Image (cartoon, coloured by chain):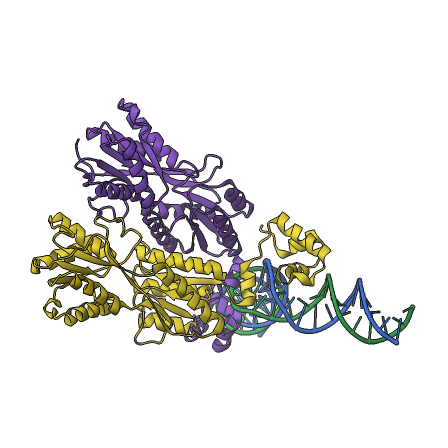
Chain colours: A purple, B yellow, C blue, D green
Amino acid sequence: MKPTIRDVAKMAEVSISTVSRVMNAPNTVVESKRSRVIEAIEKLKYQPNAFARGLIYKKSYMLGLLIPDIENLYFAGVIRGMQDACIKLGYSLMICNTDRDKDRMLSYIDTFHEKQVDGIVYASDVLYPECYEKLTGCRIPFVLVSSHSEEFDVPTVEIDDEKAACDAVRFLIELGHTEIGMIGFDHVNSVSGPPRYDGFVRALTEAGLEYNVEKVRYANHRFEHAYQATHELFADYPEVTGLFCVADEFAMGAISYLKDRNILVPGQVSVIGFDNLRMSGMFIPKLTTIAQPIYQLGYRAAEKLHELLTTGKVEVTTEKMEHKLIVRESSRER
Amino acid sequence: MKPTIRDVAKMAEVSISTVSRVMNAPNTVVESKRSRVIEAIEKLKYQPNAFARGLIYKKSYMLGLLIPDIENLYFAGVIRGMQDACIKLGYSLMICNTDRDKDRMLSYIDTFHEKQVDGIVYASDVLYPECYEKLTGCRIPFVLVSSHSEEFDVPTVEIDDEKAACDAVRFLIELGHTEIGMIGFDHVNSVSGPPRYDGFVRALTEAGLEYNVEKVRYANHRFEHAYQATHELFADYPEVTGLFCVADEFAMGAISYLKDRNILVPGQVSVIGFDNLRMSGMFIPKLTTIAQPIYQLGYRAAEKLHELLTTGKVEVTTEKMEHKLIVRESSRER
DNA sequence: GCCAACAATGAAAGCGCTTAAAAAAATCTG
DNA sequence: CAGATTTTTTTAAGCGCTTTCATTGTTGGC
């Protein structure tokens, strides 16, 4: 059996309340007893039971994280940031991988509820109304990261997708490209899909290149789909020389396709990605991309949730972080 | 306030033990009351408090996972497998990213202990004696995945690193390569470093190519290091035409270096990786590699831990899973 | 040297739940 | 239909901890 506070008390020959006080308000107990208690704790490798504590404090000091795809380097970065923030703030982290499956999200929210997490960071793409209902029904505070909701008013940490996409496409235009295509996120159940397309359209329109707006094909988060989407795009628009991919993973898939077709990147086609994953600088060619502050997004989300938990509200609801263009080798002047 | 069992009891006009029985032994309570209770539970969105339950059952139905690097696709795959197994077996999962830092491991073990996880899967590379002591001191059952320990007798799920490495190098030899180099894991604090080097040596020796055994440089988990290590290797041994990398990430770093030096892969140098990450089929060139059953490793580890938790022991201590050679585009006949 | 003020300690209640034991209700038996 | 038996429900104890409140021991002022 694991030792309990009683065992410590017995060994130190004090009452359990004294042991408790040694842990929670050490200076209210006299030195001689305190050291006896500490010694007993160490000897027994005593660790207070979080269940008993949670029962009293009604706090678990545990945060939940809902992630759509753990095998996506993007979210891996978010996790890292969030976990570091959690360490700083004294929380533990429970991570659940939803695979973008709504039922799984719902079921994980139940788990979080049962385990009494103090709050949740929701990174699972779209905030489904069912999830929102459940979360508010359970009264679990939560924040969104790399997501947002038009319907509901929820604290959010994200970048400006529209502007970032616009910057990416502008860069392609500055390079002299006039035939520009895009590999985007499917718009159904997607938060960043529409704004990134809007940014694409805006950059094009500003430059009088509106005729490109239909040169878009959609893919579904994984490079294999982007590979296929690129195939379709170039079948219809072989004239494209500038390609905007809304994710580095898509850019990799696209370049992989172009390579298989012996189309040179950046020789014949310039490709710009989005995210700046850890691996993007090592792809061949190294990716030009829009960098998101991935780690910071996760970090900030945890801080924001903490703010919400401690003060009951949040200073700014929607927090936008900065993106940045990173020019590497997958793009070139036309 | 969150509703408690009392609130449900009051609403359904029964005692709290009846409510409890509805949840734990439904057929011991008469239909009429049962449905009243169920209705009340739903109306209140009641969810039993895991703290109170844990206090009684002394089980959290939560497993801990210690991961060295969440931004490594390899471990992301392990997590996926483990999480799916956890869903099947009724556990929740608490994932902690150690960044290979011993102090962080130790501190996470304390957290796991306090949160009363039922067991731990330890994937953090080396099982440090301190960690072993702490884990056994706390009496937390644990299993190793993609790791093993010579000193201690711990249930383990892994592949045969020596044999897998040997197979990789044999393949290079079959291709006609006679000048073979390796980018390996540093041997200090590494579990798979030494056996993979041993496999390299064995394949070489079998083929009478022992003079290659010194053509090795070491890197530290990330492709940047592999890039640098490849630089050093080729500075000393420009004659190398076959390169064995002990991780796909290393292979990517190596190829990236070779590309920057205008050395063609596979034209001039054949590269074989290890792991078969999700991305390896999309790298340029697509990687020839030794596939590990990454997902299954994680899945199996969770199952094994469950076995240990329920039966108190484990049928086979060290479980070896099969690796497989996957030939793609980064290798070619000499 | 006596009583007020204070510090240190312990006893006990209670957090939300399960469950053994007791009580009550329902059913059976002769 | 009374008493025995079975089924259903309630009461109450207890899981490991914190914290309030009462108690004891110490100081110190006069």
Residue plotted at (43% across, 70% down): B140
Residue A25 showing in the rendered view: no
Residue drawn 43% across and 37% down?
Answer: A188
Q: Position of residue A102 (x, y in %)?
A: 48, 46
Q: Residue B272 appears at what percent x and percent y?
A: 21, 58
Which residue lies most toward the top here? Answer: A208
* Position above or below: A5 against A320: below
Q: Which of B19 and B311 is in front in this view?
A: B311
Position of A330 with respect to A64 (left or right) is: left
Quarter holding the C terminus of chain A?
top left
Closer to us: A117 or A79: A79
The one of B222 and A85 positioned closer to us in this rendering: B222
Res. B221 visible in picture: yes
Question: Where is residue A88 shown, x and y percent of the image?
Answer: 37, 54
- A313 vs A235, left or right, is right
Give the answer, above or below, for where A201 lies relative to B213: above
Which image quadrant for residue B211? bottom left
Residue A153 percent coordinates (x, y): 48, 37
Answer with the quarter of the image where residue A137 lies. top right
